[in-house]
Amino acid sequence: MKKHKMHVKAANMLVQALYELKQERLLVIQQKFEGFSCKCSGIPKHSRKYSMAVSRCWYKSAEKIRSRISRDLNDFSHQLEQFINTINAEDIRLPKLGDVVAEMLQIEDEFGEIKFDLKAMTISIITETIALEEITFGSFEIRLYLNDIKKLAFESPYKIIALDPNPAGSDYDVTHPHVSHEKLCEGDGFIPIRKAIQQGRLSDFFTIIVQILQTYNPDSPYVSLDDWEGTSCYDCGYTVSGDDCYYCEECDRDYCSNCSTYCQICDTTVCLGCSYECPGCNKPVCEHCTDVCVECNEQFCKDCLNNEGLCNNCQEQRKEQEDEKLKEESTTPKAEPEIQSDSVGETRISA
């Protein structure tokens, strides 16, 4: 009896959600009606202006009005098409409470226990283990959010949650070839899924989604089954196997062999973006194995700097300067010392 009460409460919530969806649809029709009426109201005004311009031979004004009418008619045609589609859309007929309860009992017969979270306003089922072409993805929870059904025209009110995830090697958020960030790529199931929700046919809703999860469409996967076990190169996006994947210790990302290298001083693996080509020896090195020349302030690998922190060019320039200085010193004549008399034997004569 308690379980049956839970079914009734959830069924009541679903009927209320469908009622709000119906109200939302009527509001959309009203907005389309107002927009369409506003467009129509401008036609007589343009007509009067155009007639006046023609009757008074204001040909330039008439041409401007004609051009404006042409632009407005294009917008009018687009709004008219949208308005027709909205008006002709199938009416939402609210299901009876007993029919919704019967749908829930049928779900339990087909998929096992149905889960209710009355506080979060969700109805869920758990699928069996899904496997496609020898790749197992585990089981999924299909969770319908009753409070979001009123947004059905804009977004899907349900999620596909992987319970034993085996995500794609290139994207952890892809848990199934047709599920990304818990959103299902519905394909041809887009309209049937929405009709099933609108009509309260919960059994059909869950059945359609399970069928999509059990089917692989090679034309529209988020990640193809052929690339499922691989890792996507962060730089070029190419999917590589684990043996051909290289982890950059600088930026903490995975790269293929073409987009990575290693420091030829410390052997650290780095991507091309984090590596630095030494201008002295043209070797790729990591940032930690470089330093700046104290003379020219250019960055070199540590092998290209001497103990004084000089690069080869600056060493040669300093050596040339020192050699030039020594050469100048060797060619400059030394000044002879000045000889002074000792005044011995000389007599000072007074004037």
Image: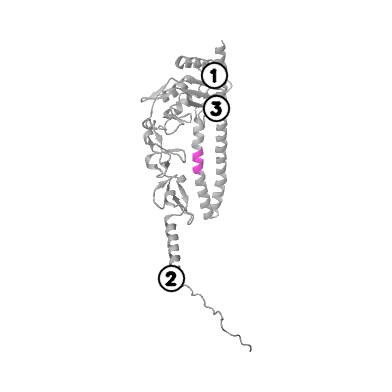
Residue 208 location (% of width, % of height): 44, 23
CA–CA distance between discs 1 and 3?
16 Å
Residue at far top of view: 1
What kind of element bears circle 2? Answer: helix
347 up-or-down from 203: above or below: below
Residue ID for mark 1: 116
Residue ID for mark 3: 148
Residue 38 location (% of width, % of height): 57, 40
Residue sitting nearer the eye, 53 or 124: 124
Q: Residues within 10 Å of mark 2 (few under 14, many from 20)?
A: few
Which label's residue is closer to the chain start, 1 or 3? 1
Q: Are marks 1 and 3 in contact (CB under 8 Å)?
A: no
| Residue segment shown in magenta | 73-79
Q: How many marks?
A: 3
Q: Which mark is residue 331?
A: 2
Residue sitting nearer the eye, 87 or 219: 219
